[in-house]
Amino acid sequence: MRLPGLLNDALRTFRRTPLLSALSIASIAFSLFTIGLFGMVALNFRETLQGIAERVEVVAFILRGTPTEAVTAASQDIQAFPEVQEVGYVTAEQALDRARNELVEFQEAYRDLETNPLPASIEVRLKPGFRDGASARRVAERIRAFAFVDDVRYGRDWVQRLDRLRDMAGVIGLVIGLAFAVVAIVIIGVTIRITVLQRAGEISIMRLVGATNRYIRGPFLLEGLIKGVLGGLLAVAMCWATYSLFRKSTGELGGSVVFFQPVHLLLIVIFGTLLGLMGSLLSVGRHLRHV
């Protein structure tokens, strides 16, 4: 059967059963909309975690009396580490000025000091992709090998908590996404199944005159594809409407919320198309095996 004929048969089904067709499209749309909402939450959560991860750094405290030349040479060596993005040297005086500005509650105590108790340090920022506990620990151990380094810190506890949050977000997102995908496939499969049963007599006649399973299956698969595309587009529109409404209602807070990239929106439509095709394929295949 050629494409125009398949398209006519598929559209004829829409005209015959508009309620069932609308239910199928709505089922896909709301399933994808739910996945999309969770996806937006996960996307913004990931953006927040990335912002926090940018603060992951390794700080090496330097023994007093260390020559500046030794620190400069070590900084160049550290800069060559594959995990390292930037290396900064903070003198003892700069550390004291920073403490006075940032630790307001201790300003008076720092102002009356006769000697500076704070050491100089080397601050190491890591590249994206290496802002995790394992990479920070690896860099810290290599820096600790320098003879003039007194201590190395990288906030091990909170970096490990950050790693756990990232892992949990990924697992939860995968589980919820798969759950809603299964629900969508079941719903579209049921609605297509009802359509197939309504046309059971027509299918039986087609089988009697020699129509192949491929010929019979074609219009239903195209119907599922069309419903999947429409459901995906409707889900995208609903996600955008929800995003816009949230930004309007939250004012400045909503300005920091990000929306999907075009490739993400395309994936939603493609996923909807696959759901429609899969639901149709399962329903029609089950019917053809029993006729």
Image (cartoon, helix red, strand yellow):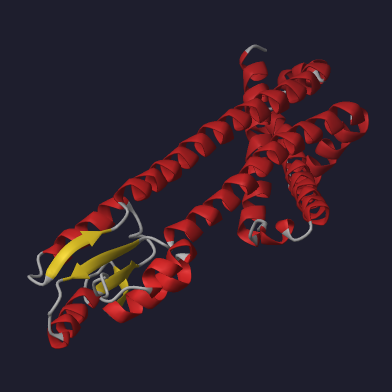
> Is residue 212 positioned above or below 124 on the image?
above
Residue 152 pos. (x, y %): 21, 61
Most extreme residue toward the top is 290
For the question of whether residue 238 can be seen, the reply is yes
> Is residue 114 positioned above or below 162 on the image?
below
Tell me if 273 is positioned left or right of 234 in this view: left
Tell me if 27 is positioned left or right of 66 in this view: right
> Is residue 251 positioned above or below 22 on the image?
below
Q: Quadrant of residue 221?
A: top right
| Residue shown at 27% from the left, 57% from the top | 135
| Residue shown at 73% from the left, 32% from the top | 220
- Total marks placed: 0
**Depth check, front residue: 120 or 257:** 120
Most extreme residue toward the left is 147
- Quarter the C terminus occupies: top right
| Residue shown at 45% from the left, 65% from the top | 103
> Is residue 250 positioned above or below 214 on the image?
below
Residue 192 pos. (x, y %): 75, 25
Residue 198 pos. (x, y %): 83, 18
**Depth check, front residue: 106 or 95:** 106
For the question of whether residue 90 can be seen, the reply is no
**Depth check, front residue: 208 or 137:** 137
Residue 284 pos. (x, y %): 67, 24
- Quarter the N terminus occupies: top right
Tell me if 76 is positioned left or right of 154 in this view: left
Tell me if 133 is positioned left or right of 9 in this view: left
Q: Quadrant of residue 55?
A: bottom left
| Residue shown at 35% from the left, 74% from the top | 96
